[in-house]
């Protein structure tokens, strides 16, 4: 892990496209501004972990587990 010291309004570059700026420091909280291209997802760690858990659950679903989801019905008449 790379550990850097920064002051308010100083930035860190990640690659050529991501800029992290120290916006504010109050007590033990640091506010960060993150400027990244739209195709790069940026999440807090706890949100990212929740997304990964939900994706893992979804990957384990069987077709029978999704019956009735969405409320759509299929018309099987030759009309």
Image (cartoon, rainbow, N blue to C red):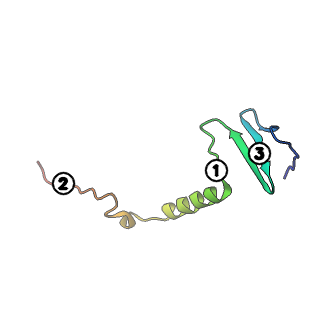
* Residue under label 2: 75
Circle 1 sits on which residue? 43
Quick one: label 1, few (<14), some, or many (20+) residues within 10 Å?
few
Residue at position x 42%, y 65% from top?
62
Say whether disc 2 or disc 1 marks the residue closer to the N-terminus: 1
Q: What percent of the width, then of the height, locates residue 37? A: 64, 35
Q: Which of marks 3 and 2 is nearer the N terminus?
A: 3
Q: Determine the residue located farthest toward the front in the rendered image.
A: 26
List x then y, in percent, for residue 77. 13, 53
Residue to which mark 3 is pinned: 24
Q: Residue farthest to the bottom?
A: 65
Report x, y in % for residue 74.
23, 55
Dot placed on the residue nearer the N-terminal end, 1 or 3:
3
- Judged left or right of residue 63, residue 39 is right
**Of the residues tagged 2 and 1, which is closer to the observer?**
1
Residue contact at pointers 2 and 1, CB within 8 angstroms: no
Q: Which of 15 and 33 is in front in this view?
A: 33
Q: Position of residue 66 (x, y in %)?
A: 37, 63
Q: Which of marks 1 and 3 is in front?
A: 3
Foreground residue, 19 or 10? 10
Q: Residue shown at 59%/61% (left/top)?
A: 50
Q: Residue 63 falls in which quadrant of the image?
A: bottom left
């Amino acid at each position: 892990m790379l550990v850097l010291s920064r002051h308010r309004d100083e930035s860190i570059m990640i690659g050529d496209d991501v800029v992290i700026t120290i916006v504010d420091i109050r007590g033990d909280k640091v506010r960060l501004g993150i400027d990244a291209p739209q195709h790069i997802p940026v999440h807090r760690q706890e949100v990212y972990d929740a997304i990964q858990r939900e994706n893992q659950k979804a990957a384990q679903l069987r077709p029978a587990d999704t019956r009735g989801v969405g409320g759509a019905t299929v018309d099987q008449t030759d009309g």
